[in-house]
Image: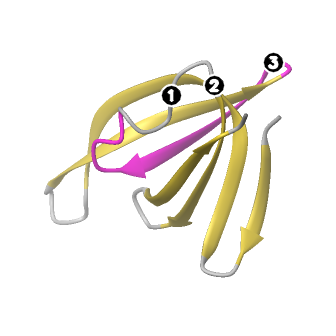
Amino acid sequence: MVSFRIQSGGLSVSGTVSVVQLGFVRDVTGKQVTVTAVTFLHHGTATNISFCGDQSRSPPVNQVVRAEFSQGVLCAALAVVVVAT
């Protein structure tokens, strides 16, 4: 299930992680910033979030997780990932 909720201090998304891809973007000064694009999937609906830094080991592919984060300008700062049991 993909769901969003706002909680004190940030946002939360839940869903099955289908893709985790490391990439780069440039900030307004031209500095390269590492991001990790994560696709959360539920019944064919995909939601993509770009997390700051190399988070490629954090959200496990093919697992239902809840990720808590705060949204930034270029990417989201990942606070915690909890795998559903």
Pick whichever, 17 or 36, lies toward us.
17
Residue found 38% across the figure and 39% down from its top: 36
Q: Are marks 2 and 1 in contact (CB under 8 Å)?
A: yes
Q: CA distance from mark 3 to mark 1?
A: 19 Å
Magenta-drawn segment: 43-56
Say which amino acid is labelled 1.
Answer: Pro
Residue found 29% across the figure and 49% down from its top: 53
x, y percent for residue 70: 53, 68
Q: Any magenta on residue 45?
A: yes
Please tell me whether residue 66 is drawn above or below residue 19 in the rendered image: below
| Element carrying mark 1 | loop
Pick whichever, 81 or 45, lies toward us.
81
Residue found 86% across the figure and 20% down from its top: 43
Q: CA distance from mark 3 to mark 2?
A: 15 Å
Q: Are marks 3 and 2 in contact (CB under 8 Å)?
A: no
Q: How many marks?
A: 3
**Number of the front mark, 3 or 1:** 1
Residue 49 located left or right of residue 45:
left
Say which amino acid is labelled 3.
Answer: Gly
x, y percent for residue 30: 15, 57
Instruction: Of the two numbered discs 3 and 1 on the same chain, state the one appearing first in sequence.
Output: 3
Say which amino acid is labelled 2.
Answer: Gln
Q: Any magenta on residue 80?
A: no
Q: Which residue is mark 1?
A: 60
For label 2, count other residues whose C-alpha is less than 10 Å away and answer few (under 14), some (14-19) or many (20+).
Answer: some
Please state, as top left, top right, bottom left or bottom right, where the N terminus lies in the image: top right
For label 1, count other residues whose C-alpha is less than 10 Å away and answer few (under 14), some (14-19) or many (20+).
Answer: some
Residue found 39% across the figure and 58% down from its top: 74
| Element carrying mark 3 | loop
